[in-house]
Amino acid sequence: MQQLFKIIKSTYRRTLTSIAFYPVLISVLCIALAIIASRLEYWKPILSLKEKFPYFFIQDYETARSILSVFIGGVISLTVFSFSMVMVVLSQASANFSPRLLPGLISNKKHQIILGVYTGTLLYCIIILTVLGASGIDSKAIGLSTMFAAILSVTCIALFVYFIHTISSAVQIQNIIDDIFCNCENYIRCELIASNENKIAIEHINTKNWHPIYGKENGYFNGFDIDLLSLEFAKKNHQIAVIPYMNKHLWRNMPVFKTKELCTVSEQEDLLRCLDIAGDRHEDDYGTGGMIKLKEIAVKAMSPGINDPGTAIDAIAKLAPLLRKFLQLPNTTSTLESQGNCIVLFNRISTEELIFLILQPIRLYSKNDPLVIRELINAIALILDEPEISKNEKEFINKELEALKEDITENIINTYDKQSLYKEINKHIELYA
């Protein structure tokens, strides 16, 4: 039963996030509208409206057929042009910024709705044209349906203008950076609130002698769904430590859980069923996934083929407050299963690994650019200035400053630039040592 519930839940989530969800939904609604409109043509209130307002309803069969044919050809042209433009934009974004940005651009709900209206209008006009052919030259069978087709076609033209505006804005790198920053910041803020209210922060807990449970899949850890635990398991006083952090890659036969009490084979299967394993590490803009996308934008901007320090500086400026807030999250949190007595411990990525994952690649690719290095120094200083970050975690951040100092010595040739960066970096090393 729990396995079936997991499949249903997973299918539901994939359906809602699919690029085809809104187009299919809107197309179905337009097909229903076509059927309803064709049935309402002979309804007495509609016939009365046709007599009172004849200029709103086309009464000539040939005119209606010609107009519907024009609508179909026009909407097909809009659809082809719009989404040919999308492919060009996505290709440029992938080449200039990062391929990791493509899922976010493709899954834009506004563009999906526009595609849905286009396809829905096409289907509506085709169905109405077919109905008119079957009805023959009957003036009563064409007025209302053709009017709805005209309204939908005008809507398509308005959406086309809006689409040109949104796609041109969506591909601008500053807007991409701002969107990722906002999504990631909101996620971290919610996690901070949850750790203060729903979850209990734990400074240290010794799980060394607990019993490991090994995974059976390869992929990236995308969460642990505690609601999928069976009621029998949840009622037991189990204590479970989830070893991987979000977006960590898991190999088959790698330990993914530790339990204080020894679990049976069926209980281990119950726990493994709650794992959410994804094929892509950065499917969204939340938490470490969003910060890694910003890091990749900065690294791509500093590559020799792009050479765009301004974009790298913008990405670093957004990364600094995100890292500052993220490092305030507790290293370990615990939560109680709502239907039982089962306690689950969650870990976040360690500060040392996070700094290595986010800041080290930027430092590596920008070590020859004094302007970007200065921004990186200021970003690290902003993180160190946060009083809620522990002293142990600040030691790892200070090591990044020391690494920056070594890179300055080896890669900055100009003496004035070198001395200026030394002065800036030594000030922060002495202040937060």
Image (cartoon, helix red, strand yellow):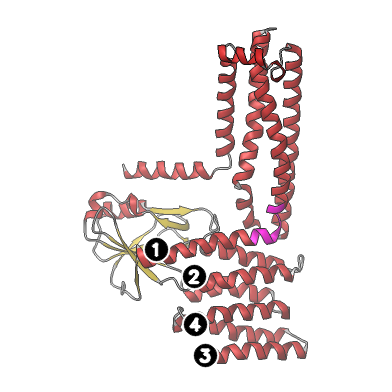
Q: Is residue 215 left or right of residue 32?
A: left
The three-letter amino acid code for the residue at tag 1 is Ala
What span is in magenta? Answer: 169-177
The answer to which of marks 4 and 3 sits earlier in the sequence is 4
Q: Which residue is mark 4?
A: 394
Q: Which residue is mark 1?
A: 194
Camera-near label (1 vs 2) is 1
The alpha-carbon separation of the residues under discs 1 and 4 comes to 24 Å
Dot 4, how many residues are within 10 Å of its Cα: few (below 14), some (14-19), or many (20+)?
many
The kind of residue tagged 3 is: Ala
- Determine contact: label 1, label 4, CB under 8 Å: no
Q: Main secondary structure of the magenta part?
A: helix
Q: Nearer the viewer, residue 85 or 60?
A: 60
For the point 68% across and 72% down, which residue is it? 313
**Inter-mark Cα distance, 2 to 3:** 21 Å
> Which residue matches tag 3?
433
Label 2, label 4: how many angstroms apart (C-alpha)? Answer: 13 Å
